[in-house]
Every structure is written in C-alpha cells, then in structure tokens.
Amino acid sequence: MSIKKIRRKTIKVSPDTRRQIAAEYGVSVQTVGNALRYRTEGQQPELMRQRALELGGVEVIDIKIIDY
C-alpha cells in the first residue's frame, strides 16, 4: 500500500473580480482562471495573481491524500 499527497494551489476571487482582472489585462476570464489555478506560468499570469490578491483574493492550498 502506498500513499500519495497531491497539493493544488489556487487563488479564490469573485466572478466580478475575475472579469475586472480580465479587462485590465485584455484577456479572457478563462485565461484569468487558468492563472489563478497556477496552470500557466510567466510574467503576465504572475501579475494577474498579484492583482487578484490586491483585490481581496485568498490563496488556498488543497491537499489530497490518496491511499492506493
């Protein structure tokens, strides 16, 4: 039997905040969502994450432990 720990980091914001960030950076709401779920890397996603935190976003780390 083996145990695997999976960590996922995300930044939680309201839908209105996502739309605001998308408008500020000239990208789609889906692009902002990918940045806030750390699915993309680079300067622009990092700036979007910083902006989300400035606007009241909360960084959450989900940890799942899988026993297989």
Image (tube, rainbow, N blue to C red):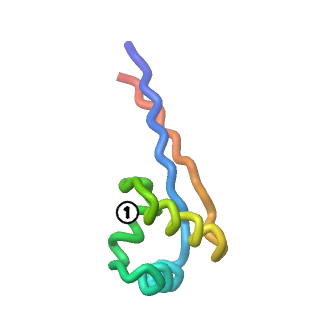
Which residue is found at the position 43% from the left and 21% from the top?
3
Task: Pinpoint residue 60: horizontal percent, then vertical percent.
Answer: 58, 54
Which residue is found at the position 52% from the left and 40% from the top?
63
Q: Which residue is mark 1?
A: 34
- Up-down: is 47 above or below 63? below
- Quarter of the figure with residue 22: bottom left
Which residue is found at the position 53% from the left and 81% from the top?
17
Please give the count of numbered marks on the rendered protein: 1
Determine whether, in the image, residue 56 is placed left or right of residue 28: right
Task: Pinpoint residue 29: horizontal percent, then vertical percent.
Answer: 37, 77
Task: Pinpoint residue 8: horizontal percent, then vertical percent.
Answer: 47, 46
The quadrant of the image that shows the N terminus is top left
| Type of amino acid at the residue the image marks with label 1 | Asn
- Up-down: is 46 above or below 6? below
The quadrant of the image that shows the C terminus is top left
Task: Pinpoint residue 30: horizontal percent, then vertical percent.
Answer: 33, 72
